[in-house]
Image (cartoon, grey):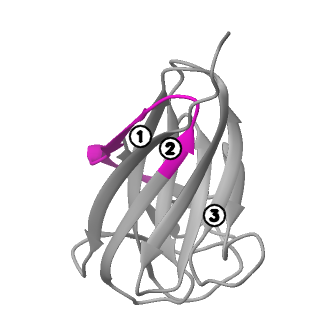
Amino acid sequence: KGKNVVRISHYSGVLTTSSFTFTRNGRSGTFYFEALEVTPKRTGNYTFTSNSTIDSYGYLYANNFNPLNTTSNLLTHADDNGDETSDQFSLTYTLQADTSYTLVFTTFDPDLTGPFSIFTMGPSRISLRRLSILSTFSIATTFTTPAISGKYDALWFVAFHYTMIS
């Protein structure tokens, strides 16, 4: 007979003023964050719980996290634990074995820094690996368009800067 064993994994990190930043959907201000690649060895329900002196917020994404589009690939998110007795997030989701997900630890209020830990519970240990910037690139272009009078051209300059977290 098989036994139901809960495996616990742990990750510790620190948000600093050098951490990655983004603007949370529906909120103003700058939020520091740390993104973790999550890879379970077995399919099942996994619970992610934060532990910190700061009021935390957690996001879980399928595949990659795009800080410029925080709703893309979003599976679930949590502010406080389920019964709202703590400022720490607790979220549960069914993960597929050998599939990569991204867990984002951030804060409820902007401009906060400090140490934190993430604990996971589920049917197997889970790999938690800090993600860093994979690539940054810029695209710039100029183009002209006729002015209304036709006598002068307007000069336009467009620049894009994109950072990919991996």
Disc 3 is placed on an element classified as strand
Residue 36 placement (x, y as % from top left): 40, 48
**Classed neighbour count for the residue bearing mark 3: other residues with Cα under 10 Å, few (<14), some (14–19), many (≥20):** many
Q: Name the amino acid, label 2.
A: Thr
Q: Is residue 130 visible?
A: yes
Q: How many marks?
A: 3
If the image is split into quadrants, where does the N terminus sit? top right
Q: Earlier in the sequence, mark 3 or mark 1?
A: 1
**Which amino acid type is shown beneath numbered disc 3?**
Ser
- x and y percentages locating residue 76 in the rendered image: 72, 53
**Circle 2 — which element?**
strand
> Residues under labels 3 and 2: Cα distance?
15 Å
Q: Is residue 1 left or right of residue 48?
A: right
Sequence order check, earlier mark of 1 and 2: 1
Is residue 162 placed above or below 111 in the rendered structure? Answer: above
Residue drawn at (50%, 44%) of the image:
102
Give the structural element (helix, strand or loop) at label 1: strand
Q: Nearer the viewer, residue 144 or 25?
A: 25
The reply to whether dot 3 and dot 1 touch (C-beta < 8 Å) is: no
Q: Position of residue 123 (x, y in %)?
A: 58, 30
Q: Could you say which disc has been placed on residue 102 in the image?
A: 2
Label 1 sits on residue? 37
- Residue bearing the label numbered 3: 90
Q: Residue furthest right?
A: 83
The secondary structure making up most of the magenta span is strand
